[in-house]
Each structure stands twice: as C-alpha cells, then as structure tokens.
Amino acid sequence: MARLALLILGLIGLAACGATRAEQVRANDKPMRIVSLDYCADQYVLNLADREQVLALSPDASKDFSYMRDAAKGLPTVRPTAENVLVLKPDLIVRSYGGGPNAQAFFERAGIPVLNVGWTSSIDGAGMTSIPGVIQHMADGLAQGKRGEALVADFKARLAAIEPQGEGRSALYMTTGGVTTGPGSLVHQMLQAAGYENFQQAPGWHPIPLERLAHEQPDLVAPALFGNGLETPDAWSPAKHPIARAQLEQRPVVKLEGAWTACGGWFLIDAIEALSEGGAP
C-alpha cells in the first residue's frame, strides 16, 4: 500500500508539472491524448473526436451495450483507476460516471482537464441537459464544434420527421433485467415521441408490473435486447416470469437494441424511429 501511495503521489507530481500545458489544452488546443473512463463517455469520444485524438477508452467500449462498439475496435482500453490513467499522461479525461464521484476533482488537482458528459433530462430543447445541448457541450470540449453542430442538426431533423403511430395506444418498455420506467425518464419521453402512452405510470425505475399484467395488457411491448436476446444471468429476474413472457408472445412487439437506451444520447432517435415504424397499423 505504501509503495502504491508513493507511485500515485509521484504520478500526480508529474501531472501537476504539466498543469500549465493542460490549461492551454483546455483553452486553445485540440486534445490529442484523450482518455475515456466509461462507456457513456466512449460514445461521444468515438463519434465526435478524430481517431488519432483517442489515447484509450473504457473496457466496456466494445461491449454489446455500447452503441459505438464497432468504432472502438482496435483502440486501446484502460481501467478507470487513478494509477492506470495517470501513467498514460492524458491531456483530457472524458467521463460520465467512470472513476467514481471524486474523479473529476482528483484528476483536475493533478492538472488534467476533465470533460463531463453531464445529466441528460430531455430529448429535445435548448438547455444544457437536453440531448442536443449535451452533444454540443461534448463536441466543443473535444474541439469538434462543427461536428457537434452537424450531429445536432441531424438529430433534430430525424426527430421532426417522426410520424407518431401510437394513436393513444399504450406501450411497455422492458429490459432483460426485468425492470421498466415511468414519467421522468428519457425512455418515457421516447415512448411519447413515438406517439404512445407509457403503460408504466409510476415515476422512476421499477420491476415489471407482473400483478397488473395479469389482468391488464399494453397495446405494444418494447423490449430492450442485447446480443443474447432476452436471456439474463439473473434467474429470478421478473423478465423470466411466465406473465412477462406472455406479453412478448401475445402482444405486438417492437424490439429495441439495448444500446439505443443504455445511455442518454443521440442514438435514442433510433429507438423512436423503430417504435414509430414498427407500431404503424
């Protein structure tokens, strides 16, 4: 432990010596040694930054739940721990949750700028917490402002072209982990944007309402699937209950790729389009 502490202190000292350079990167230069600490941050780095800007991604960058997983192939990865990141001498760290709640303060004390993805609370709008606002914030932080503007324009154009097909029908969002969500979430807004009423009306995330499903059914089911389909390592997941399985067998289904809703980003438009097109009479 003592040797590890000395190593970290030494790395912090080296990084602190480069604080002036880090501030210049923040203010003027294009970062060329970007390290991303989690798969939500990976999405923005992979889509908005040049490949040669990327020093390392999170270990989850190529997993099934990573939307930009194909673009991550061939790029180095790093565990989001202080010693592993500092030794790479990045000039920008990008994160959503990676490294833990104290990561930003820690790395900034070491002289390394940190670009946070930030909380996304709405699909559209002018605020910093909307998907367009987050896109532009990330693009500017990566010195790719024009690329961000183009992505925002494409997102808004696709959203404006949606023809809601729900016509007052209800839809139930299901995950392989056996949960769903109601008002206050991006998934709730996603269903509304496609023209559906959310079958789940309780705010927050909750287990699939099996008791309600025993006597009341949604008009459409939207399961979020990953590479293994509906299989889940949790043998007790509500998604494995016969009542939940019956929804998938007896109700109209629009399958959603799990990566579309795993993080709040521009790729949510893929799910909205799928719901609108798949739910058409």
Image (cartoon, rainbow, N blue to C red):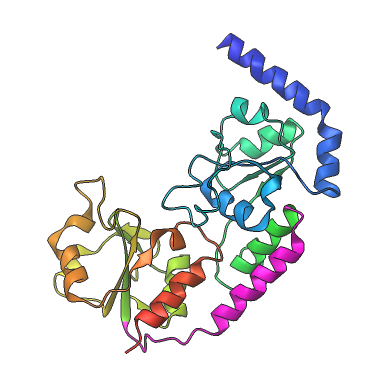
Q: Quadrant of the N terminus?
A: top right
Q: On the picture, is 133 further left or further right than 191?
A: right
Question: Does residue 272 appear anywhere in the picture?
Answer: yes
For the point 82% across and 33% down, the residue is 19
166 part of magenta stretch? yes
Q: Which quadrant would residue 219 be assigned to in this image?
A: bottom left
Q: Which residue is nearer to you in this view: 159 or 69?
A: 69
Q: Residue at x 27, y 74 (%)?
A: 253
Q: Position of residue 55 (x, y in %)?
A: 66, 39
Q: How many marks?
A: 0
In this picture, residue 138 sits left or right of residue 163: right
Closer to the camera in the image, 110 or 203: 110
Residue positioned most to the top: 2
Decide if residue 117 is in sight here: no
Residue 136 is covered by the magenta coloring: no
Decide if residue 242 is on the left or right side of residue 261.
left
Against 137, is 11 above or below? above
Magenta region: which residues?
142-169
Q: Nearer the viewer, residue 44 or 117?
A: 44
* Residue 274 position (above or below residue 52): below
Image coords of residue 129 (percent x, y): 62, 63
Q: Residue 131: where, in percent of width, then height?
A: 59, 66
- The quadrant holding residue 204 is bottom left
**What residue is shown at x 28% (from left), y 77% (from top)?**
220
Residue drawn at point x = 66 percent, y = 57 percent: 48
Q: Is residue 118 left or right of residue 168?
A: right
Q: Is residue 212 above or below residue 192?
A: above
**Residue 108 in the image: above or below residue 180:** above
Q: State the residue in front, 142 or 172.
A: 142
Question: x and y percent of residue 193 in the render?
Answer: 47, 79
User: The C terminus appears in which quarter of the rendering?
Assistant: bottom left
